[in-house]
Structures are given as C-alpha cells and as structure tokens.
Image: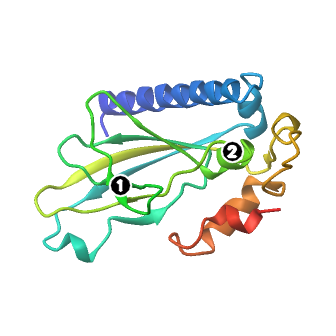
Amino acid sequence: MCCIHREIVRSYCIQVRELGFRIQELISESLGLEKDHIKNVLGEQGQHMAVNFYPPCPEPELTYGLPAHTDPNALTILLQDLSAAGLQVLLKDGKWAAVNPHPDAFVINIGDQLQALSNGRYKSVWHRAITNTDKARMSVASFLCPCDNALITPPKALTDDGTGAIYRDFTYAEYYKKFWSRNLDQEHCLELFKN
C-alpha cells in the first residue's frame, strides 16, 4: 500500500473512532448518565475494521453475503457502497427491510454490549447482507470493542426503578467467546446472559 493510501486509511480510522466515542457520549447522556460513563465502563476499546466484498450472484436468493446476526461489540460504524444496496435490518413485524445507501452517511449499529449496558433501553439490531445479480459492492465496517476485562453491567440509575438488571454481569471476553461458539443466526446471544 503506498504512503498516500496508508495515510488516508489511518486518518479514516482515527476519525471514525472519534465519531464512535462521541456517539457513546450522546448515548450516555440520553440515559441520564455522565457523558463518559459508557467509555469508562468499556475501558481501552479496541477498533477492528472489516472490508467486505460481495461479487454479483446469478441466484442471490440461494445465498447470503452474511447471515442474520447482531454485533457482539459495543458500536459498529458502517460505510456502505453507494452503487448497490445489500444491508437489510429485521423489523418488528419479522420482515427484512433494505437500508439504502446515502452519500456522506454512515449506518450506526448498536451492539450487544450497549444493549446490556443500557439495560435494554437501546437494542442491538438484527441485520444481514445479501448479494444481488447485477453489481459487486463493498462495505467498510468499523467496530468499537470493549477491552476484554470490561465488566458489562448496567448502572444503578437504570435498575433502581424496580425492574432490576435484565442481564447478569459478564466480561466482554466471556461474551465474545460465547458469541463465536454458536451459529450467528441462532437466538440472540444476550438471551444466554439473562437474569
């Protein structure tokens, strides 16, 4: 990779990471918490990126680009290819809806860790990637992941209303291991951590 491209990728990674931290601050504040609460709980967050390429497929109904799943991390920031739609989200009525790409926009997915930390107030979204017959497409996903020993537990302010914690306390490492020990499209992995 030439130096110019390396610098572009480096700059992109830094800016997306900062965007993710800002979103975490806004989520904390929306829950009535200090703005740094989520960032502090998640510790020194890792950042992973996945560049996905989906070639055209003559029979797209016979395959998935990526099966239905929720993201095991805290937050995902997705840059979609503008040339073709492929991301779908599961609606409440059980139907899949396309997320059409928009210029100068990201798709933000709440991950399982934020669902647990918010005591279910925020939901991780079931999504999948499909192929199409005409066009190849790419996507760039950036994942913010808690440090392995981050203790995922909702703050007292979100459990003092008499409902209690929906999920038992767990570390991110424990969750991540359990998440990948099963098929992606099985029941929501958080169900295994319910109180």
Position of 166 relative to 122 (above/below): below
Rendering coords of residue 78 (x, y %): 41, 42
**Lateral position of residue 55 relative to residue 178, left or right:** left
State the quadrant of the N terminus.
top left
Real-space Cα distance between discs 2 and 1?
Answer: 25 Å
**Residue at (60, 75) in percent of width and height:** 182
Rendering coords of residue 65 (x, y %): 32, 65
**Residue at (18, 55) in percent of width and height:** 136
Q: Secondary structure at mark 1?
A: strand
Residues tagged 2 and 1 counted as in contact (Cβ below 8 A): no
Foreground: 140 or 111? Answer: 111
Q: Amino acid at mark 1?
A: Gln
- Answer with the quarter of the image where residue 53 lies: bottom left
The residue that mark 1 highlights is 88
Foreground: 150 or 85? Answer: 85
Rendering coords of residue 35 (x, y %): 71, 22
Q: What is the residue that sits farthest to the left in this orientation?
A: 134
**Residue at (84, 48) in percent of width and height:** 163
Rendering coords of residue 62 (x, y %): 25, 77
Foreground: 81 or 7? Answer: 81
The local crowd at label 2, few if under 14, some if 14 to 19, many if 20 or more residues have their Cα within 10 Å, is many
- Answer with the quarter of the image where residue 38 lies: top right
The earlier-in-sequence mark between 2 and 1 is: 1
Q: Secondary structure at mark 2?
A: loop
**Residue at (50, 27) in percent of width and height:** 14
**Lateral position of residue 10 relative to residue 79, left or right:** right
Give residue 187's mark.
Answer: none
**Lateral position of residue 24 relative to residue 184, left or right:** right
Give residue 146's mark.
Answer: 2
**Lateral position of residue 125 relative to residue 173, left or right:** left
Q: Amino acid at mark 2?
A: Pro
